[in-house]
Image: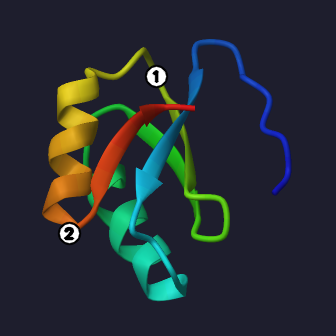
Amino acid sequence: MTAQTDTPGSVTAVYKVSGMSCGHCEGAVSGEISEIPGVSSVQAVAATGEVTVVSESPLDEEAVRAAVDEAGFELAGRA
């Protein structure tokens, strides 16, 4: 996984998601989180269970939890 640097006016957060095991899982989680307003980039890695999200401002964790739930997985919290 490559490190992501914040660009001016952006926030990077890393979340732990349980249950991802493949590329399809990564795509499902990334797709749902990318629909949250203000999200500019999502990178999910099944091997580590980490999801890196870049957004315009800090995200409401409940919005992230709802998106992950919609994808069929569980948000374990911030990494």
Looking at the image, is mark 1 or mark 2 earlier in the sequence?
1
Secondary structure at badge 1 equals: loop
Quadrant (top left, top right, bottom left, bottom right) of the N terminus: bottom right
Please tell me in which quadrant of the rendered image residue 19 appears.
bottom left
Q: What residue type is labelled 2?
A: Gly
Image point (78%, 38%), residue name: 4
Quadrant (top left, top right, bottom left, bottom right) of the C terminus: top right
Identify which residue, 2 or 15, lies in the foreground.
Answer: 15
Could you say where residue 61 lies in the image, as x and y percent from the top left? 28, 25
Secondary structure at badge 2 equals: loop
Q: How is the image coloured?
A: rainbow
The answer to whether 47 appears left or right of 68 in the picture is: right
Distance from Cα at disc 1 to Cα at disc 2: 25 Å
- Label 1 sits on residue: 56
- Label 2 sits on residue: 72
Discs 1, 2 touching: Cβ within 8 Å: no
Could you say where residue 70 lies in the image, as x and y percent from the top left? 14, 61
Could you say where residue 77 lies in the image, as x and y percent from the top left? 40, 32
Image point (46%, 22%), residue name: 56
* Circle number at residue 46: none
The answer to whether 3 appears left or right of 79 in the picture is: right
